[in-house]
Image (tube, helix red, strand yellow):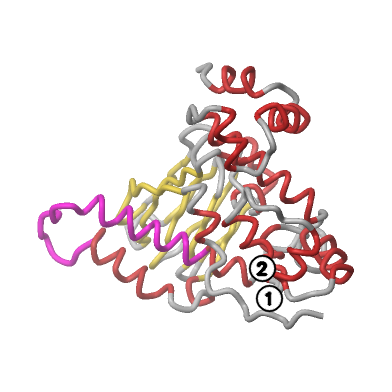
């Protein structure tokens, strides 16, 4: 059996280099009374409660998420659109910063697709988060009556970006449980949390066009073929070949939507020809690349 590799140092960058996520701060300061949040189907939210209390209520499509009462510094992350309201005391004792979140490719983003609709995490649970939060609040809500500094919006947006990456890093090591299940779900996050499977996933994410057959992936993971195949299916919920095929299709959709030629996309993703990619794309998406790309241009 190949020697077990050490845990990879970076399990997020190969994903986020292909599929970016962008944040934009839109509120900093006290909240009082009832505030509703919903800006359309393409935006998620990242809220940070630093002080005070909040009653969280959900409505519309997110009603099944129920309600929550927050009394300690907490981070609330909605990866995708989820109508919600905050009910806060009218004495302006509740201090929050809030940002919208937009994942490239929307719900098809490989990280967004495996996250629960709401990640509610006390700040004390995530080591290292305090420094980023302190820097964010210092920039977003400076002490005194000083006028906003130049570049404040840009700096706050980048600090929200850093905060989100730190949260995603923590979620990899603490995969969210499937509702009603006793353990972590079978998802990409669970695979990235596995000390050996993460090497194989990183390899596929970083070089999607390489020839990743079972023997080569097992060697990268430091496992026997049979053990790797069984463990991958148990933890991630699919075979390595199926996972790689889906990953390539997500990348193909992204690149075609940007206007890259089909032949070039096929070459980058390891297909023998444009027609081979076209057949795989149609089987996955239910329509040929040309028709799919035209549909993306429809408002």
Rendered-image quadrant of the N terminus: bottom right
Q: Secondary structure at mark 2?
A: helix
**Could you tell me which residue is drawn at 55 percent across and 40 percent down?**
81
- 161 within the magenta span: yes
Q: Picture coordinates of residue 80 (x, y %)?
A: 56, 43
* The quadrant where residue 276 appears: top right
For the image, the number of numbered tags is 2
**Could you tell me which residue is drawn at 73 percent across and 83 percent down?**
3
Q: In screen coordinates, is 192 left or right of 29?
A: right
Identity of the residue furthest to the left in this view: 146
**Could you tell me which residue is drawn at 62 percent across and 78 percent down?**
7
Residue occupied by mark 1: 195
Q: In screen coordinates, is 34 left or right of 275?
A: left
* The quadrant where residue 50 appears: bottom left
- 148 within the magenta span: yes
Q: Picture coordinates of residue 249 (x, y %)?
A: 67, 39
Dot 2 alpha-carbon crowd within 10 angstroms: few under 14, some 14 to 19, many 20 or more: many
Dot 1 alpha-carbon crowd within 10 angstroms: few under 14, some 14 to 19, many 20 or more: some
Q: Picture coordinates of residue 26 (x, y %)?
A: 33, 46
Q: Secondary structure at mark 1?
A: loop
Query: 126 above or below 257?
Result: below
Query: 200 above or below 37?
Result: below
Residue 98: which numbered mark, if any? none
**Could you tell me which residue is drawn at 84 percent across and 73 percent down?**
224
Q: Are marks 1 and 2 in contact (CB under 8 Å)?
A: yes
Q: Picture coordinates of residue 134 (x, y %)?
A: 32, 71
Read off the magenta span: 141-167
Residue occupied by mark 2: 198
* The quadrant where residue 195 appears: bottom right
Identity of the residue furthest to the front in this view: 272
| Pick the front one: 259 or 48 | 259
């Amino acid at each position: 059996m190949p020697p077990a590799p050490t845990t990879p140092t970076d399990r997020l960058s190969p994903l986020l280099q292909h599929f970016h996520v962008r944040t934009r701060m839109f509120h900093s300061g006290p909240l009082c009374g009832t505030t509703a949040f919903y800006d359309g189907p393409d935006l998620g939210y990242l809220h940070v409660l630093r002080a005070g209390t909040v009653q969280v209520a959900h409505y519309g499509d997110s009603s099944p998420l129920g309600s929550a009462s927050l009394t300690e510094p907490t981070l609330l992350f909605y990866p995708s659109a989820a109508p919600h309201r905050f009910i806060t005391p009218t004495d302006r004792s509740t201090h929050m910063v809030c940002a919208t979140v937009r994942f490239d490719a929307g719900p098809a983003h490989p990280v967004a697709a495996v996250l629960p609709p709401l990640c509610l995490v006390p700040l004390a649970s995530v080591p290292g988060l305090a420094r980023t939060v302190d820097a964010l609040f210092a920039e977003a809500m400076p002490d005194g009556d000083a006028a906003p500094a130049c570049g404040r919006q840009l700096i706050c947006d980048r600090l929200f970006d850093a905060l989100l990456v730190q949260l995603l890093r923590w979620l990899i090591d603490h995969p969210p449980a499937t509702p009603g299940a006793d353990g972590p779900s079978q998802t990409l996050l669970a695979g990235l949390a596995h000390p050996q499977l993460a090497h194989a996933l990183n390899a596929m994410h970083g070089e999607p066009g390489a020839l990743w057959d079972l023997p080569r992936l097992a060697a990268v993971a430091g496992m026997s073929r049979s053990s790797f195949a069984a463990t991958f299916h148990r933890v991630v919920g699919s075979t390595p070949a199926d996972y790689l095929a889906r990953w390539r299709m997500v990348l193909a959709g992204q690149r075609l939507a940007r206007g890259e030629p089909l032949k070039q996309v096929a070459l980058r993703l390891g297909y023998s020809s444009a027609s081979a990619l076209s057949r795989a794309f149609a089987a996955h998406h239910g329509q040929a690349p040309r028709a799919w790309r035209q549909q993306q241009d429809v408002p």
